[in-house]
Amino acid sequence: MSRALLLPQVFKIKTIKRLTPDTLLYEVTDQDGNFDLSYRPGQFMEVSIFGSGECPISITSTPSRPQHIEFAVREVGLVSGAMHNLEPSEHIGLRGPFGNGFPIDALKGKDIFFIAGGIGLAPLRSLINYMLDHREDFGAIDIVYGARSPELLCFAEEFAAWQEAPDTRLHLTIDKETPGWQGKVGFVPAIVKELGLPPRDRAAIACGPPVMIKFTLLDLAALGYPDEDVITTLELKMKCGVGKCGRCNIGPIYVCREGPVFRLSELNRLPAEY
Amino acid sequence: MTQWQQFKKEYLPAVLSKLDEKWDVFAPVEQEDGFRFKQMPAAGEVFLGPRKPLLPLKLLFLPEVEELFSYSLKGVSPELTQAVSGGRERVIFGALGCDIASLDILDRVFLTEPVDEAYRRRGEQATLVALACVGEGPECFCTSFGIDPLQPKGADVILVTLANDTPQSEKKETKQKFCGGAGGSFPKEPPARRRQEVFLLKAFSKKGKRLVEALRPLLTEAPQSDIAQLTDLSSNSRGDVPADSLPREESELWDLPLWKNLASRCLGCGVCTLLCPTCYCFDVEDERCGAAGKRFRAWDSCMSSCFTKMAGGDNPRPTKVERVRQRFLHKLSYYPREKESVACVGCGRCTVHCPVGISIEDVILEINRFLASGGEGGVFEKLPPSTPQKTFVDSAGQVSRTPGGKHE
């Protein structure tokens, strides 16, 4: 008998790291300390906290580092709140992976322009680290990452590795001048504009709060990026992850099934109900 | 055994108890809280007439609330126990064509990969005995979607009630007699005239043949005079609701003035979606008691303001305008384009039970009118924004208090 659609598998939390005051990073393995589920950058899983429920969380680790899987979880709702009360060696349930993931093959050979705000870096980090592990397959990598203040930047421990990677630049920004801050100051779209990276052979991949996305897309259009080369990843309320529970549709498509990664050219054909 | 068989009405208790030997039998009965399918009803309770149960047949395949698994948190790691939906095979006795057709619409969701095993098993274990329906309800328009209420596709057995004035009479039966008399008095009081009622039945599938075979000791071959009556049967279901123009791209229908108008009347109660035989959206929730708990899925409604509201508070469908549009476009545009069938079977439950008289039939007519007029708002714009009574629009565009305008 095939596995029941909505039945999760039990996994163990190996480590928990604090990324920001409201966001924790969970490293998850199976009971024996391994992890052998295959997934693609940009996919998500339904995470169960038994007694509280289930919610979709993007995978932030990369399949090129296969011994574990990681989730960055910001405390916003019932399930994420309950997850924040867990300790290492406690258990969660997982279903998935779900969704399409980033179009890695189509991105090969291109320069990549990552644009992220706040927790929006979590799904992009999967692809960034994947690309750094397959560095020769991709062109120049530029990462613009912003948050309101320095302590709200996620994954700060990895910034040095990204900056030191070949032909890779990290442009960090915060909203307001702060003592001791070495990076840029200003909103993410403003930095995108300031960098003015030309669209030739380059794909832009953006994830962040709706207002950041809205202005970033305008700026990318002004820089001449064609809609096919602008990629974003969406989140909508989801329950089943397989296009059956009926709530994450944008017009005729289900974000859990056809998404969550979309090219802007695909989004433009959909009603603006997201 | 593929010929029409028959049994007399007084054999119905024997038929039901014979079925009960092998199957769990569900049949429609009148209960305090409405007309609905009941497991193993007493034969006297069973009402076999062209009357729709309040709750659609989907509840026997996609239960209102269904346990998915239970868990114990006592051990080192949580232990999950999957809910088993085993049990005996089922006979659903007296299902109507609209409801049977709705199962095909649900199949296209739950039987496509990844298959929902619990749903698949329930379908596999069910034998559907359809009652040939002459479409008594003024709200019925199943034939507009190509459904044959007399011999619905997907039925394993078709059951027809015939009423003869005398056994072997020449018969000059009207449809009303065929329907077994009107309303709820039928099961309790004997008919005024001396009539002998018989049920004709015939298998249309392997499962159906098995059922008819099991009943063999109670059946006799139907006489030609009775079989001849079958060709006289016709349905009152209205086949003129113009569903052929569907589906359309949502871009053509997104800005219909209709959505705002309907939203201003809609109370957001969700009765339309809960009573709809083709609505299948579900929610998944946990219930925990100490160190043990269960996870359920339950019917959900796109008319609820929480349906798409995210943990952070964002909601892509914040008002009733978006939610009303979602309900109708899902049935009439999104689902049909993916699954090649409109997600409506014309049962009319949503229209009959809507407290403000919103009718999917009117919506289909209005979409047609909108497209024909090149984008002009139609009759809904002329209606007062919140009409407490039901209003119906017939195919000629006439507004009346009764569906179709012609039924009293």
Image (cartoon, coloured by chain):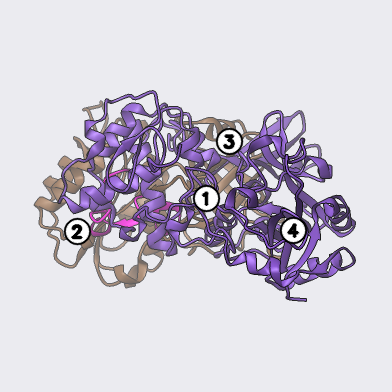
Chain letter of disc 4 in the image: B
Q: Are marks 4 and 2 in contact (CB under 8 Å)?
A: no
Whole-percent x, y for residue B47 in the image: 72, 44
Image point 40% across, 59% down: which residue?
Answer: B336
Q: Do the residues labelled 4 and 3 touch (CB within 8 Å)?
A: no
Whole-percent x, y for residue B13 in the image: 86, 50
B102 horizontally vs A157: left or right = right
A235 horizontally vs B4: left or right = left
Q: Do labels 1 and 4 share a chain?
A: yes
Residue, disc 2: A227
For marks 1 and 4 on the same chain, the one whose residue lies earlier in the sequence: 4
Residue, disc 4: B199
* Dot in front, 1 or 2: 1
Bin the neighbour count of mark 1 within 10 Å (Cα to Cα): few under 14, some 14-19, many 20 and up: many
Q: Which chain is brown?
A: A
> In whole angstroms, how far apart are the C-alphas of marks 1 and 4?
29 Å
Q: Do labels 4 and 3 share a chain?
A: no
Image: magenta residue range: A250-274
Q: Do labels 3 and 1 share a chain?
A: no
Under circle 4, the secondary element is: strand
Under circle 1, the secondary element is: loop
> In whole angstroms, how far apart are the C-alphas of marks 1 and 2?
37 Å
Q: What residue type is labelled 1?
A: Thr
Q: Is residue A256 magenta?
A: yes
Under circle 3, the secondary element is: helix
